[in-house]
Image: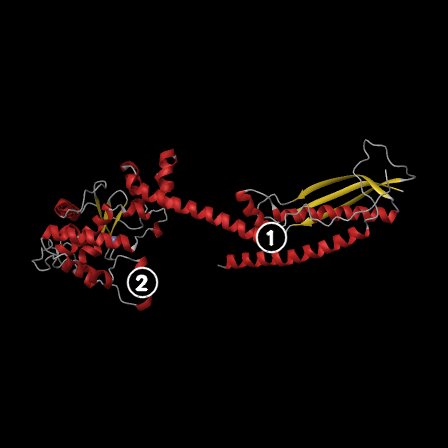
Amino acid sequence: MIELITFLILIGVGYFVGQHFESQHYASIKAREKQTLHIPLMTFGAKQTLPHAHEAQMFVGSVVVANDYFKTFSASLRNLVGGRMVVYESLIDRGRREAVLRMKEEAIAWGASQVINIRFETANIAGQQANQASCVEVMAYGTGIR
Amino acid sequence: MGPYVPKEMTEEVNITPIHPLMNLAHLFATVAVTGLLIYGGLGIAASQLATRIGPKTEEKIGAAITASLPVKTVESDSRVAYLEDLLSELQRSVETAKLGKAEYPPLKVRILEMDAENAMVSAGSYLMVTEGLLAAVTSENELAFVLAHELGHLHHRDPLRAMGRSLVFVALGSLLGIGQSTSALPSVVNLAELSYSRQQETTADDYAQALIVAHYGHGARSLGFFERNREPDIGALNKLVEWQQTHPMSSDRIERLKNRFQQKNWPTTGAATPLPENIGCANFTSCN
Ligand SMILES: [Zn+2]
């Protein structure tokens, strides 16, 4: 009984706090994406000729997003039956967009006119055990030119 | 290449538009339904298995269960032979009572060193009677009713059915050769949970009643033991308690049996068959 109550509290905290932070984060992401929209981001650059530039520099944006208990529990149920890990989609999406924004904001501060050759890296931090809250690191890097 | 025109993305292409709680509810329902299907399927498989389990497996299960009982059995007592005789007389009357052919393994009678008045059967046809019961009965008719009730449980394979879903795992284990060591068995079968449903008790009562009438020609004195050991009436809780401890008979069960004597036009008067002297003492020698 006590275990069930603890579980329900954890799920409740995970859901409400997790949802609250997620919606706050999305609001921030959307606002900052709008602010930085004028700088184009491109994935080409490795094989193509680069646009003319006086200077180039690499920028790295990296973020670690933690999972919440609600998402972990939903995912463990999903693991039983298979299918789309819907609860993790927003987690990864937030990670990617936040990493790109951090990279982009740094490039803008440097004075970049565009950021080319953008790449992503992800790494799983901890979370090898099923009931252990896991988090994911998303890193975006690219070449800013001015 | 034209000039760069920034375009804002407003669609969320990377996120499935489903509310996380809906997603969880859907997952819960799927897992719960599947779980229930498996649980129900195991139950059906168990009741199917209960009647088809091989005699060897049943003997093995019975041996393991009786070996794990926390009560000592009385060794080499001449009362065992008496009980065996009485039981085989009762078994001979099964045909007269038109109760159908029994298909349980041969009986193994044990007397338990225990003061509580009780009798029980386990898989493998182990029939156990406590010393307390032998000391408490006042006529052979009373003792025979208790024994006949247990025979009823055996006849309907209740000890196997009571093992329920764990029976599936026991049977699978013995099929695959995992269950070679029967010492692991009591941990698979939760002994504390072995109990019969009210339906099973009622059916065993009916069986015993028909058998007693067929054997003695009347039902007189057969319910005496139960009437003296009636469950105390404790009001609303009664139903719950009755569900759990079915062996001290409740008033409801005794009344039902009395009415059934009348319905079936079975005589309730007749001479009681006496018990051998000193049945409450080891080897019928007087106790001190
Ligand atoms: Zn019974």
Which label was assigned to residue A126? none
Q: Quadrant of the C terminus of chain B?
A: bottom left
Q: Which of the 4 image quarters holds residue A50? A: top right
- Which residue is depicted at the point 37% across and 41% down? B168
The amino acid sitting under disc 1 is Pro
Q: Chain of mark 2?
A: B
Residue B71 makes an appearance in the image: yes
Q: Chain of mark 1?
A: B
The x and y percentages for residue B217 are 9, 53
Q: Which residue is mark 2?
A: B239
Q: Upstream in the sequence, badge 1 or badge 2?
A: 1
Q: Quadrant of the N terminus of chain B?
A: top right
Furthest residue in direction right, as rendered: A54
Which label was assigned to residue B20? 1
Furthest residue in direction bottom, as rendered: B235
Disc 2, SS:
helix
- Which residue is depicted at the point 34% across and 43% down? B46
- Which residue is depicted at the point 90% across and 40% down? A55
Which is more toward the observer, A63 or B57? A63
Which is more toward the observer, B72 or B146? B146
